Amino acid sequence: MKSRIAIAAVLMGAALTPTLARAAESGAEERGSWGALLFYVINFLLFVGILWKYALPAARHFFKDRATGISETFSKAQSAFRGAQELANRAAERMAKLEAEKSQISSDLADETVFQIGRVYDLAREAAARIKRDAELSATAMAENAQRRVRAALALAAGSLARDIVVNNFQANDQTRLVQGFVDKLGEQAALR
Amino acid sequence: MRSSKVAKRYARALLGLSTDNAQLEAWGAELERLAKIVDAPEVAAQLESPTVTHAERIEALGKIAERLDLSFPLRSFAVVVASHGRVREVAAMAETYGHMLDDLMGRARVTLTFAYQPTAEDLARVVAGLEAIAHKKIIPTTMVDASLVGGVIAELEGKIYDGSLATRLAEAERRLSG
């Protein structure tokens, strides 16, 4: 900031000085122009020196920065170009592979479909076998139950019939014989002890 | 079976009062008579009434024993039972005493249920058979139950010996029904 102020002050000084010099020497124009020429030369040299000292490095710095920026931008553009080219190559490769993938997927789908059909068929067969087995078991159980009930009913009827026959035909000597049988059994038990 | 710990204690105490079997038998019969009276509903209701005092209860049981013409030990026993507030246990005491006395005498009581009224011969044969098993003298109590159809059932010392026709028929029926 200070350097800029100083540069501005010198430039202002240089610009005002020839005006003052011309005003001072306006009355002596007829004495010749060597002094004025010298003044202009010195003034020009000072101007060139000031430019050489202060403006040239700034301009150099500006253009150097600009060149660096352009160079960086250029290399970025080149890099982006290479990336885009690479992507394009990949896309082309991918496109080439898509056809193979398509046929592979188609083949996989066909295999999976065959597998699933087989599985469904096996499951259906197992379910049918299970249903058949359950039905057979149920039928067997129902038949056994029915047989058991028939047997129970027959036994009840037979028991009732036997009881009626026994009661109707029971005689005194039957009771004696039963008592004797009971006593014999008691005797057998006594012998076992 | 009305036996209880209390009844057992009292029965054992009465049995311990004598070693004379005849006397113990007599006491058993007297205790049975006392139990029958005390266990009668109208007497029991009076004895257990809350309006009757403890002293009146003791006096009442003493009078009952006197009316029954019980022996002196049994009268004392009745008074002791009443004074200890165990009048309700007298029937159980009599039953327990009977069992203990039977054990002491080497005999057993059996309940015989016949399908028909048994002849003396049939009864004697069954009793003899049971004596052979129990190795004790058997005192039978006979009952008649026509539902047995035929034969006899004996209940001896908690075991049932079943020789009835009804049971055989039921068994045959059970086998037929599978």
Image: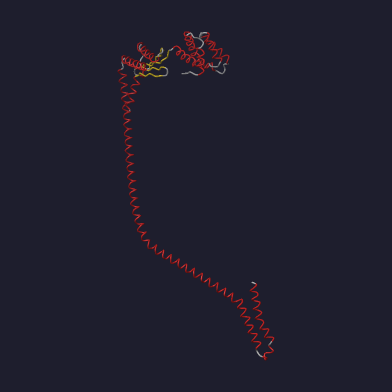
- For the N terminus of chain A, give its image quadrant: bottom right
Q: Nearer the viewer, residue B21 or A64?
A: A64
**Quick check: A147 left or right of A81?**
left
Q: Foreground residue, B74 or A100? A: A100
Tell which of B78 and A169 is nearer to you: B78
Query: Of residues B59 and A105, which is closer to you in this image?
Result: A105
Vertical placement of residue B148 versus A82, above or below: above
Quadrant in which the C terminus of chain A is drawn: top left
Q: Position of residue A91 (x, y in %)?
A: 41, 64
In the image, farthest residue toward the bottom: A30
User: On the rendered structure, is A92 left or right of B11?
Assistant: left
Number of disc labels: 0
Residue B37 lies left or right of residue A4; in this view the side is left
Q: Position of residue A28 (x, y in %)?
A: 69, 89
Decide: is A172 above or below A127. Answer: above
- Residue A165 lies, in percent from the top left, at 30, 20
**Residue A59 x, y percent position in the rendering:** 58, 75
Colour scheme used in the picture?
Answer: secondary structure
